[in-house]
Image (spheres, rainbow, N blue to C red):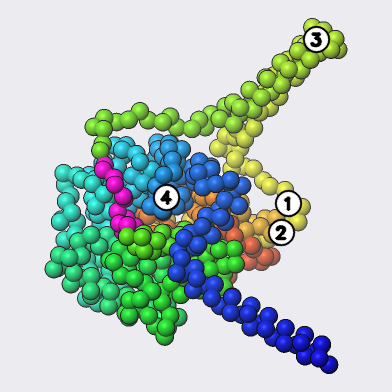
């Protein structure tokens, strides 16, 4: 009996102790942002087989330059500036050489990333001269970050950009992507405006605008400590508010205006933390690259605030010094018959052939005939390598995939929201592709379906992020993301609902109906297409 009592006591003691440890873990991570930062970096190191962060920069982040790496690079520059970013900088310049970027705020994002990597490339100054104010509020905000880091232009000054930002504020103290005063303010844009205005917070007019915006953000915080934007509570909005508070010198853990029912905005952010240290966009969902990336930036901002460093968007001990001359451009990656990997493969075949011939002579296993045979075989292999993936336009569009376990789904592509715009690629009825039944392999995704549909119906399609695991469609039928504003681009719905998953993450089932639609408001105008947006 005594043994049973002792055993029961031991079990109860263990359960209580374990519960205490688990419940204190989130608070400990909040008090120590370095732990959360290292946790996120550890995930990416593991996923990309990188020994350390420098290897991660030279590998994964350089491979995804221009796609998803930019804010990772800025965060690392502000967390540990001793890393070398030369590999990433070269990759981003290569991306810019190969792509014509017209969106103003996107250009500014790349210019900021170049700054973070230590580059003085003329692209930075040219962007500050030509892009600031080129596409609404976001181009003013990113432009002000450039100016705050010493990138000045002849046409825009800090004062003129600040005046433009203040003029776009709504009556409730917030900002939205579109200047229409009838539209509600947005949490993310308001927080991002505060981040840009933070260095001028002592100026009377700006101080008043800051307090009004903080009141708005405080009012929008939920009882759980998090925020909702574009139709749902999400991690990214929490991250943006944290960065804003730290930039203004306000502790997210102690500011009374940002505590609801004892919950802080950091508590809100951690609602989206997954067991591996990454973050989901919505609670209960899987890993989101965007949410994890923005969580990292928030923790770096908090770390900088706690350690007395400059705000997240102000680089330490940095002076922008353009050369005055255009640096030598990095040649674009070859897309011809011998791409880079083909050259290395051909070199390997040639080296292997030479070694084989030498071995034949050394071990007296062959003579001139055998050597000629080896050489001919090597040439044949090189010819095969040279011909891999070389397809004409007609060949690509006429290709038909054969599936072992096919399922049938229906795909359509529409741009009703653009009807009336003067663009030859916008059909009068908005229908680019009427409902079309196609086959894909069982277990295929929305991305697989749209690739098959556009190939079969000869519709131009461009996509990004395939190497990063965050594939998204940037253009269909020559209509591209951001062509009609910072929130414009392509989204998809399955069976009348727009999910919060990337198109390469959503697995389709037999009979599913997929609609790709062009949105002007990140899905808030989905009703135009008769679908419901979960975002």
| Quadrant in which residue 365 is drawn | top right
Residue 80's tag is: 4
Q: Are marks 3 and 2 in contact (CB under 8 Å)?
A: no
Q: Are marks 1 and 2 in contact (CB under 8 Å)?
A: yes
Q: Which of labels 1 and 4 is toward the front? A: 4
Q: Which of labels 1 and 2 is toward the front? A: 2
The x, y position of residue 408, in whole percent, is 68, 61
* Residue to which mark 3 is pinned: 361
Q: With 130 as the anchor, is 79 left or right in this view?
A: right
Mark 1 is surrounded, within 10 Å at the Cα level, by few (under 14), some (14 to 19) or many (20 or more) other residues, namely few
* Residue to which mark 1 is pinned: 403
Q: Give the camera-side residue of 51 and 389.
A: 51
* Residue to which mark 2 is pinned: 442
| Quadrant in which residue 185 is drawn | bottom left
Residue at the limit of the structure toward the top, as seen here:
368
Count numbered badges in the picture: 4
Q: Give the camera-side residue of 58 and 379.
A: 58
Q: Could you tell me what secondary structure mostly forms the magenta stretch?
A: loop
Q: Which residues are magenta?
A: 309-320
């Amino acid at each position: 009996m005594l043994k049973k009592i002792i055993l029961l006591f031991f079990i109860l003691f263990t359960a209580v102790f374990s519960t205490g440890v688990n419940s204190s873990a989130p608070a400990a991570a909040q008090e120590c942002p370095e732990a959360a930062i290292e946790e996120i970096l550890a995930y990416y190191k593991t996923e990309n087989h990188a020994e350390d962060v420098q290897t991660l920069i030279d590998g994964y982040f350089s491979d995804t330059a221009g796609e998803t790496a930019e804010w990772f690079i800025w965060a690392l520059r502000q967390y540990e500036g001793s890393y070398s970013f030369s590999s990433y900088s070269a990759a981003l310049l290569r991306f810019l050489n190969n792509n014509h970027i017209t969106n103003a705020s996107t250009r500014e994002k790349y210019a900021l990333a170049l700054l973070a990597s230590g580059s003085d490339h003329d692209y930075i100054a040219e962007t500050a001269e030509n892009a600031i104010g080129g596409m609404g509020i976001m181009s003013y905000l990113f432009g002000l970050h450039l100016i705050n880091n010493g990138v000045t232009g002849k046409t825009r000054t800090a004062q003129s950009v600040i005046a433009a930002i203040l003029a776009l504020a709504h009556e409730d103290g917030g900002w939205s992507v579109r200047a229409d005063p009838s539209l509600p303010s947005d949490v993310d844009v308001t927080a991002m405006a505060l981040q840009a205005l933070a260095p001028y917070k002592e100026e009377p007019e700006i101080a008043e605008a800051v307090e009004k915006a903080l009141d708005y953000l405080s009012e929008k915080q939920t009882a759980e400590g998090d925020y909702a934007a574009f139709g749902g509570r999400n991690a990214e909005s929490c991250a943006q508010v944290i960065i804003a508070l730290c930039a203004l010198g306000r502790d997210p853990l102690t500011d009374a205006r940002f505590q609801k029912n004892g919950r802080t905005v950091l508590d809100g952010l951690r609602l989206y933390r997954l067991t591996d240290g990454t973050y989901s966009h919505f609670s209960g969902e899987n890993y989101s690259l965007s949410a994890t990336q923005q969580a990292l930036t928030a923790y770096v901002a908090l770390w900088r605030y706690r350690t007395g460093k400059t705000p997240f968007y102000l680089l330490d001990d940095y002076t922008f010094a353009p050369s005055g001359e255009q640096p030598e451009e990095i040649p674009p990656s070859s897309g011809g018959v011998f791409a880079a990997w083909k050259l290395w493969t051909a070199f390997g075949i040639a080296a292997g052939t030479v070694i084989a011939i030498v071995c034949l002579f050394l071990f007296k296993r062959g003579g001139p005939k055998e050597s000629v045979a080896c050489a001919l075989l090597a040439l044949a292999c090189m010819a095969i390598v040279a011909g891999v993936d070389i397809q004409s336009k007609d060949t690509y569009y006429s290709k038909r995939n054969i599936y072992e376990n096919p399922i049938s789904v229906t795909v359509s592509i529409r741009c009703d929201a653009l009807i009336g715009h003067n663009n030859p690629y916008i059909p009068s009825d908005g229908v680019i592709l009427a409902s079309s039944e196609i086959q894909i392999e069982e277990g295929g995704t929305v991305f697989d379906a749209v690739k098959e549909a556009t190939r079969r119906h000869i519709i131009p399609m461009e996509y990004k992020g395939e190497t990063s695991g965050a594939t998204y469609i940037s253009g269909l039928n020559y209509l591209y993301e951001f062509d009609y504003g910072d929130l414009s681009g392509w989204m998809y719905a399955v069976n009348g609902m727009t999910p919060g998953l990337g198109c390469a993450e959503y697995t389709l089932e037999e009979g599913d109906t997929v609609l790709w639609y062009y949105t002007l408001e990140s899905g808030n105008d989905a009703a135009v297409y008769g679908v419901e947006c979960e975002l």
